[in-house]
Amino acid sequence: MPSPGALSSASMPMASVSVAEMPRIGFWTIVLIFTWLLLFALLFIPVGSVLVSSLYDNAGDFTLGNYIKAIGDERIQRAFFNTLLVGFGGLAGALILGSIMAFCVSRFEIAGGRFVSLLAIMALVSPPFIGAYSWIVLFGSAGIARTALKSIGINIPTIYGLSGILIVFSLKFYPYVYLMVSGALSNVNRSLEEAAEGLGLTPFQRAMKISFPLVLPALSAGGLLALIHAIADFGTPRLIGRGFNVLATEAFTLYSAEIGSNMSMATTISVILVLMSMVFVLMQRYMSRRNVYHGNMINKPHKIRLRGWKNVLAHFAVYAIGLAGAIPVIVAVIYSFRKTSGPVFQSGFALQSYERIVFGLGDVITNSLTFSVASVVLIVLIGTLIGCLVARRTTLNTSLLDGALMVPYVMPGIVIGIAFIAAFNTGPVVLTGTAAIIILSIFIRRLPYTVRTTSSALRQIGPNMEEAAISLGYSPFRAFLKVTVPLIVPGIIAGAMLSFVTAINELSSSLVLYVGRTMTMPVRIYLLILDGDFGTAAALSTILLLLSGTAVYIAFRFLGRNEQALL
């Protein structure tokens, strides 16, 4: 009978053979597993926590009563319809302004066309709450412009309320329509319009029967982008709504009232807001893919040189829209240098507001830079890998992954903040009150943008070079690192800069998640505006705009001034 030691020795070769025969897990399989685990931790658990919280009452019993209460609550009903009102109102304003500007710039010779596009970009990258602040400075109860007009006998209403929100949204979100429609108009085949002209169609008939159908998908997609951002915006309705509540502000109000409890009503409103956003995002994706027209890049339309009053009217329309959209940036910069006495502006200029920032608010700048850079590093490293996975490995798993990544895309920032509080306030991992929770919330919310841009870039690059490297003995990871990454480095850097812009301007989720030591610039600006300290708010806004503008400039250096990449 053999000894136990002999049995052990005899079994060892078999064990070594079985290990050797185990299939190796490939690099992209590891990336896929890691991505699903990441989404489970930072997306499914927070979203699940919101959903579960909305299905339980304060006693901890399962119920649909929160939804029944929300449907029957007059205040929430009003907030729901107000959300649709500002969303579609902002959509209408953006469509009107953006399409007029796009048509004039694309079809007519406009002096300073590049400057006009720069004005649109300034409006696009500046945070909406800075726009709200600037219009308060001009047309608030004691606004500079309103007071000046009143002194000569002209009384106009304040910016507060629905009309003010619609003005801010129209001027803030029109660049989505302008950039998409101008790109589509520039690619319309000139021969189609020439043929229509030969058939005797008037310019208006040519525009309606030829140009309009061809740019309708771009018009619809740009308009829906404006709608999605309008219904998700928190800062503008909060600052100038003056009692005009929307779902985003209502969710924050209920969250503030329910701190320490199970946040059942705040999470219920959050679920409703996410569902509403998802409907419009699906519509936007459908319209952007529907009836895609590929124009002849050689036979592009000529720009017409207008004369007389038509030329004056076209220039006036373009510059009026562009300058009105850029007013928030201009006002913030000018008033950051105005002399102040406490919160009150005085005549003359000084650096008092910047002195207050240097000696009292330097920590919020440090926090914003630290959180933004940390989140962007994570976004670039992980988003590039996931983008390559989605683009190069078309399987059911990656298709499901691509669909799952749409969830943070449709979640407004205020909902992300509430979801992270619901998930990480108790349990094995407690993150509330830390810098990590803000960094991770920004990371998961902005991750889909980098995944989308990376996968789009890779789909334009064939996999032949990467496959050739693997056939020469490179591992999949080394082939990815040595071959694929260098090809998409410009896009990665540009995407990183644009992610930095959105990260450093994030207000809504940070407002829910911050504590005193983790306050960021947008949160501080928001609180300064509420306190009436407009001078310091203007100075801090100017610093924020300078950082954002620098990042956009760097992005354009790598994108070749492709304005549509901002979308």
Image: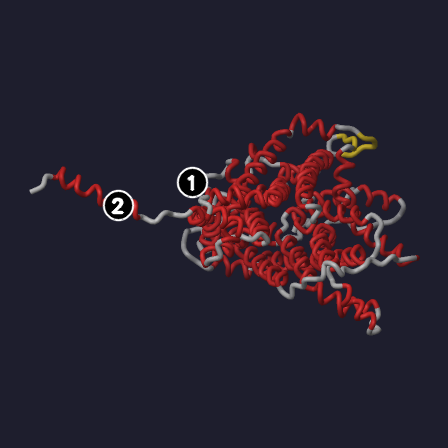
> In the drawing, does residue 544 fall left or right of residue 21?
right
Residue farthest to the right?
308
Q: Which residue is found at the position 77% from the left and 32% from the top?
A: 337
User: Looking at the image, which residue is at 63% across and 36% down?
Assistant: 521
Name the residue located 51 percent from the left edge and 56 percent from the top edge: 403
Count of numbered marks: 2
102 or 464: nearer the eye?
464
Nearest the viewer among 341 and 43 is 43
109 left or right, relative to 258: right
Q: Element type at marker 2?
A: helix
In 3D space, how far apart are the residues under numbered discs 2 and 1 (Cα atoms)?
A: 41 Å
Q: Amino acid at mark 1?
A: Val
Residue 269 in view in this figure: yes
Residue 275 picture location, percent across and down: 55, 58
Residue 218 picture quarter: bottom right
Name which residue type carries label 2. Val
Res. 248 mark:
none
Residue tagged by mark 1?
429
Tell me if residue 161 can be seen: no
Residue 516 location (% of width, % of height): 56, 33
Is the N terminus in the top left, top right, bottom left or bottom right quadrant?
top left
Residue beneath disc 2: 17
Categorize mark 1 by other alpha carbons within 10 Å: few (<14), some (14-19), many (20+). few
Q: Residues within 10 Å of mark 2 (few under 14, many from 20)?
A: few
Nearer the viewer's eye, disc 2 or disc 1? 2
